[in-house]
Amino acid sequence: MNQLSGQTALVVGASRGLGRGVTEAFVDEGASVIAVARDTRPLADLAARSPLLHVEAADASDPIVAGTLLERHSPDVLALIAGATPLLRPIHHHTWETFSANWHTDVRMTFHWLREALLLPMRRGARIIVMSSGAALQGSPLSGGYAGAKATQRFMAEYAAQESRRGGLGITVTAVLPRLTPATDLGRPAVAAYAARTGVTEADYLAQLGEPVTPRVAGAAFLRLAADGQDAEAAAYLLTADGLQPLK
């Protein structure tokens, strides 16, 4: 039996990278998936193959979008994956605008969706999964405010989980922090930049990172959290090629 059969999942940032992997995993497990992206063209092939996929072209950081789509679709699972690609420069080569890009996109998007999910509220037993980044744990000196923004997303997920418990809402909120990976459009240039910064080849740098987190790995991880629901053992997880590792 498909693990999400009869359920609705709303994936924000569904068109590429790890978000695409999550979208495909949810569809494969029988969920009716609302795929939200600014550019929906990369989803055309998946939508043509599966009647379970429904595409919404929208700016996820727009505060009106969050409330509108949550009310319209009433999802059982909300996956927040969208985010800006940071400019890869040392801190003194940034402007404030480039440094703060992920605060204005990633953090803003997370705030709007978590706020609307709690205010609505989403149905009891709903699961919200926020994609942060492993950079929240060790920093990211070539990507401006990216690491701080990702750490804040993790905090926001925990704050929302606390409010769900305080209000007796029964909504599970979890953060996932994937390790740097060359398997996405965001990760590939970062790998090249950090290899150059440390004076090693990209191949050697990748060897240090170990097996990459792929869209398929991310899909399996989000599927586990979506299916486990209230049985999630931690508020946040590091995501590696080996799967989810609980964080304290």
Image (cartoon, rainbow, N blue to C red):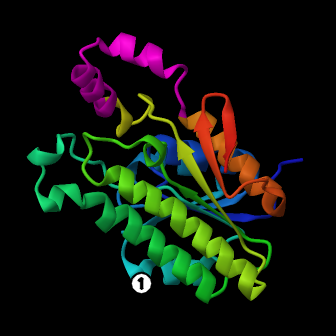
Please check the rendered image and state whether residue 198 is part of the magenta-colored stretch, yes or no. Answer: yes
Residue in the foreground of this view, choosing between 115 and 184: 115
Residue 97 versus residue 222 in the image, above or below: below
Residue neighbourhood size for the residue with mark 1, other residues' Cα within 10 Å, grouped as few (<14), some (14–19), many (≥20): few
Tell me the magenta residue range: 189-214
Is residue 218 visible to us here? yes
Please give the count of numbered marks on the rendered protein: 1
From the image, give the main secondary structure of the stretch colored magenta. helix
Residue 194 versus residue 21 in the image, above or below: above
Residue 2 versus residue 180 in the image, above or below: below
Q: Which residue is mark 1?
A: 64
Residue in the foreground of this view, choosing between 195 and 17: 195
In the rendered structure, which amino acid carries the disc numbered 1?
Answer: Ile
Residue 150 versus residue 78 in the image, above or below: above
Q: Is residue 109 left or right of residue 115?
A: left
- Location of residue 45 in the rendering, given as x and y in whole percent from the top left corner: 50, 44
- Location of residue 91 in the rendering, given as x and y in whole percent from the top left corner: 17, 46
Look at the numbered disc 1 and give the secondary structure of its residue: helix
- Location of residue 169 in the rendering, given as x and y in whole percent from the top left corner: 75, 83
Please check the rendered image and state whether residue 121 is part of the magenta-colored stretch, yes or no. Answer: no
Task: Please name the residue shown 38% across and 71% down the image.
Answer: 108
- Location of residue 180 in the rendering, given as x and y in whole percent from the top left corner: 44, 34
Q: Is residue 60 left or right of residue 100?
A: right
Task: Please name the residue shown 41% across and 46% down the image.
Answer: 42
Residue in the foreground of this view, choosing between 205 and 20: 205
Task: Please name the residue shown 78% across and 56% down the image.
Answer: 232
Residue 61, image quadrant: bottom left
Task: Please name the residue shown 33% across and 41% down the image.
Answer: 140
Residue in the foreground of this view, choosing between 56 and 112: 112
